[in-house]
Image: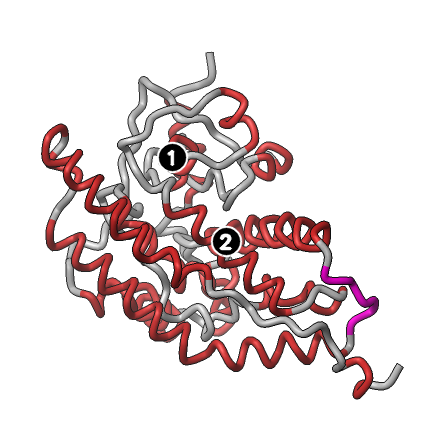
Amino acid sequence: MSVARNLQAPDLQPIDVVVYAIPVFILLIVIEMIWAARRAPEKYEPRDMLTSLGLGLGSTIAGALVAGAIYAMMLWLYAHRVVSLPNVWWVWVLAFVLDDFNYYWFHRTAHRVRWFWAAHVNHHSSQHYNLSTALRQTWTGFFALSFAFHIWPALLGFHPAILLTVAGINLVYQFWIHTEAVQKMPRWFEAVMNTPAHHRVHHATNPRYLDRNYAGVFIVWDKLFGTFEPERDEEPPRYGIVRQLGSFNLLHAAFHEWTALLGDLLRAPWRHKLGYLVREPGWSHDGTREGSDAIRARWLERNPPA
């Protein structure tokens, strides 16, 4: 089949579900702020929330600037697809599940490879955990090539409009799990779906919780691939990053890890430069720092399983 014929695709356009969800996001943040004011005023810090809003706005602008390029790449892959999938309900369901699977591996890689962590870290940089934290999104995901995890299914025959729409649904789902106002959900729901309790673990800096629960929508991926950790009542999460940001400066929040990475690359001997790009955050060639695995191992030595 020629490339020109391959370009003939179903008449589909992506639905920007995130735009439609923005009023709901705002309403839920206001409701949570009212709840916090009455029950837990420490959950919201005005300067922290403004930083989150600024990162969210910047991410929206950055995403709009590169959306056309990403869509063009997806169309190119779709033009060379191996099969043609119809525009029917089961293809949408399959695309949603596949996108969530891809999100798990993107998210896991973003925590285990420093290059991707440099773009992702700002989502974790708040020491507060509330719905405004969900808005802390990257400005540099395109530069980091994070989109590569999500666009390849177009080569399998999934139309780019379907892939972008289900990715938006995935992102909207993840908004509500950034809260401490909701405790445990019903057991059957906790067993399958990502929930506030599961995601609080993911945002925690406690050694027990580091680099766990990467799921987007379905927590089953973490259970399948050995990265699941339940939230424990006896150990409340402590939020942020191992080396806390220590600033509400918006530009520092957006770029601090890129500048730190550049500094390490400039100082490191040539034989170790690649390690700073592809090894886990916290790795250093001289052993003067430690990553999450070392932090957890040291903690387990002091707190062996019963």
In the image, which is nearer the foreground, mark 1 or mark 2? 2
Q: Which residue is mark 2?
A: 169
Secondary structure mostly seen in the magenta stretch: loop
* Residue type indicated by callout 2: Ile
Within the magenta stretch, is there residue 77? no
The one nearer the camera, 20 or 200, is 20
The one nearer the camera, 107 or 178, is 178
| 174 is higher (above) or lower (below) than 80 | above
Q: Residue furthest right?
A: 1
Residue 161 rendering spot, x and y as whole percentages? 60, 68
The residue shown at (56%, 37%) is: 222
Q: Residues within 10 Å of mark 1 (few under 14, many from 20)?
A: many
The residue shown at (37%, 75%) is: 62
Instruction: Kindly report the distance in space between the C-alpha atoms of the residues bearing marks 1 and 2.
Output: 17 Å
- The segment highlighted magenta reads 81-87
| 271 is higher (above) or lower (below) than 165 | below
Q: Secondary structure at mark 1?
A: helix
Q: Earlier in the sequence, mark 1 or mark 2?
A: 2
Q: Which residue is mark 1?
A: 196
Give the colour scheme of this rendering: secondary structure
Left-right relation of 227 to 246: right
Marking on residue 216: none
The residue shown at (75%, 66%) is: 157
